[in-house]
Image: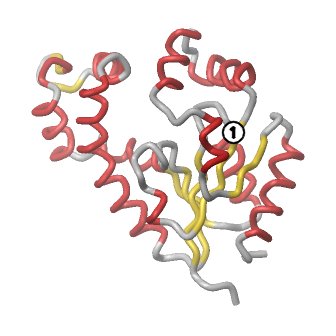
Amino acid sequence: MTQSKKIAVTGGIGSGKSAFCDVLRGLGYAVFSCDEISAQLWTDAQYLKSLGAAFPDCCTAGEIDRKKLTEKIFSDEAARRRLNALAHPQIMQNLLAAMAAHGVSFAEVPLLYEEGLEGAFDGVIALRRPLEQRIASVRVRDGLKDEEILLRMAAQLDVAELNKKQCFLLENDGKMQTLEAGARAALRHFGIA
């Protein structure tokens, strides 16, 4: 039987993390998402109160205005660090607790290297995809303008830096067959399959 393993899946915005995680789910593995856990935090009154205290200028009628908060964190590095310091410990606590219930599990962790979270996992799968494909994917998925996408990309690790990291690096060409083959190769690499 395979021992317990927690594997992170990371990569820049538009790299194909979610599609890759869907492949892993299809293979029968437990897969979690930091973005989904973050969304759940937005239903927690104490978390919202903390956000309001940290970002009073992003409140409208006593409630956090997500649009204002998003604009602020992608235009103000100190604000982004403040938000990450507030959100990431709670996200990671919830994520690792959920993963602990499974022998082998995967987690989509967008800012893994940027936040120094790789040590919490037994391995990392990093996806890399050509810039034009990433931009086109995010434009369609989120309806963002190219300038907004590039601001988000600028807040993430430069994809060239992935060559220096200890990870299973998967080059995503946007084809499902590539992600499926990559998933099987990654499972073999980590001794799971």
Question: Which one is in front, 167 or 67?
Answer: 167
Question: Which one is in front, 157 or 44?
Answer: 157
Q: Position of residue 118 (x, y in %)?
A: 48, 58
Secondary structure, mark 1, is loop
Indicate the quadrant where residue 125 lies: bottom right
Q: Position of residue 152 (x, y in %)?
A: 48, 24
Question: Residue at the spot x=82%, y=63% of the render?
Answer: 184
In this picture, is 44 found above or below 160?
below
Other residues around mark 1 within 10 Å, as few (<14) / some (14–19) / many (≥20):
many
Question: Residue at the spot x=75%, y=68% of the render?
Answer: 187
Question: Which one is in front, 134 or 46?
Answer: 134
| Quadrant holding the N terminus | bottom right
Q: Is residue 117 left or right of residue 143?
A: left
In this picture, is 84 found above or below 144?
below
Indicate the quadrant where residue 193 lies: bottom right
The residue pinned by badge 1 equals: 16
Question: Which amino acid is tagged 1?
Answer: Gly
Q: Position of residue 182 (x, y in %)?
A: 81, 54
